[in-house]
Image (cartoon, helix red, strand yellow):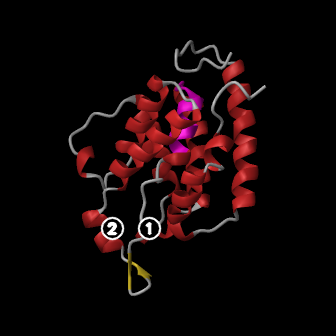
Amino acid sequence: MLDDYVTLETLLTDSIAKKHLPKAGYCHAVNTAENAFELAIDRKICVDLATKAGLLHDIGHTNWEKQGEWDYQSYNEFDIHTIKGAERAHELLIFKGESLGKARDIALAILFHSNSSPVNKNVKLTPLQQVVSDADDMDKQDGGSHHNVRISFAEALQRTRRLDMLVYRQTRNCNNGCEECDLK
């Protein structure tokens, strides 16, 4: 049933995601994907694209630590995780067999998801990009604490599998006519 397209589980279990997503936290990644799903339904945006971008939105994070503590000030001033993340996600999506158009749209949503990015200044976001930005903001905590909320990989995988089924059902029953959702 889900074998003919790239699933969230396929992305989460890839070695690239397993290397980079824990830096920003599996909990935050999955929460953002779940938030993106709900927002996409409300705003009639493709849930497939929104959840993938939500899951991978922080794949460009590196550890911003100074003397063993999260250095939020340096992160806010010098971070380029959106740029690195868009590139990593794009490569991962293409490697897993995602269509070029979907991979591009997801990568651009990741590129523009955060106000911490210098590339996000004075950019009018597309509806998908706005969904991912808003989904990320819904999970934010002061001082970047949302990146420190931990869940096990097993829990992240379980929640991702559940979300895959919701995306599949929503897409199969979708009458929005969005060309991006071609899972039917």
Secondary structure of the residue carrying numbered label 2? helix
Residue 73 among those drawn in magenta: no
Residue 46 among those drawn in magenta: yes
Q: Residue at x 51, y 47 (%)?
A: 56
Farthest left residue in view:
122
Query: Tag on residue 75?
Result: 2
Tell me the magenta residue range.
44-54
Where residue 120 sits, quadrant-wise, is top left
Q: Main secondary structure of the magenta part?
A: helix
Image height of 68 relative to 9, above or below: below
Horizontal and vertical percent position of residue 158: 76, 51
The amino acid pointed to by label 2 is: Tyr
Secondary structure of the residue carrying numbered label 1? helix
For the question of whether residue 158 can be seen, the reply is yes
Query: Toward the viewer: 99 or 126?
Result: 99
Residue tagged by mark 1? 144
